[in-house]
Image (cartoon, rainbow, N blue to C red):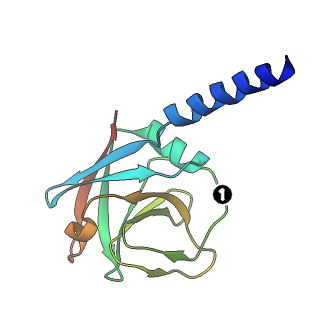
Amino acid sequence: MWKSTLGAAAFALGLTGAAMAQEQIRISSDWGEVTATLADNEAADALLEMLPLTIDMRDHLRQEKTGFLPSDLPELPRQRDFSTGTLGLWSSNHFVIYYSAGSVPNPGIIILGQVTGDVSIFDRSGDVTVELTHLE
């Protein structure tokens, strides 16, 4: 009897896990738009709750666009390396879109997600305003 109950619980958990897709967002600007898959963490969840959101961004070090969020996101473990298309958090409210791969100094960034489209639309000098919206 306990085997069938355990089997039913495992089946139910499997369905729940399969049904829980990672959240996606659209990042649009005058330069084009891309989609991104958010990370499965508290900071990305908090970002999702802020949407829709408009952020004025500037180019930094010819590798990223940076802008400020209206409020802080939760602090999580950080990493120094990032890939092309990484969405990150530098300080508690400093949102970053990386359009080339590289690394940052300590303390590193909190990973918020990964662009699934062609992030090279942001690979140009100058400021840009982006709008983040939830794809449902």
Q: Residue at x 63, y 67 (%)?
A: 78
Please say if 22 is above or below 127: above
Q: Residue at x 62, y 50 (%)?
A: 74
Please say if 92 is above or below 107: above
Q: Nearest the camera: 45 or 20?
A: 20
Can you give x and y, in whole percent of width and height, for residue 79 in the image? 60, 71
Q: Residue at x 51, y 52 (%)?
A: 39
Q: Residue at x 35, y 78 (%)?
A: 100
Please say if 110 is above or below 44: below
Secondary element at image label 1: loop
Q: Which residue lies under the disc numbered 1?
A: 76
Q: Is residue 61 left or right of residue 113?
A: left
Question: Quadrant of the rendered structure where residue 34 is?
Answer: bottom left
Task: Look at label 1 and name its amino acid.
Answer: Leu
Estimate how packed mark 1 is, as few (under 14), some (14 to 19) or many (20 or more) residues with alpha carbons within 10 Å: some
Question: Quadrant of the rendered structure where residue 58 is?
Answer: bottom left
Q: Is residue 131 left or right of residue 64?
A: left
Can you give x and y, in whole percent of width and height, for residue 11 in the image? 64, 27
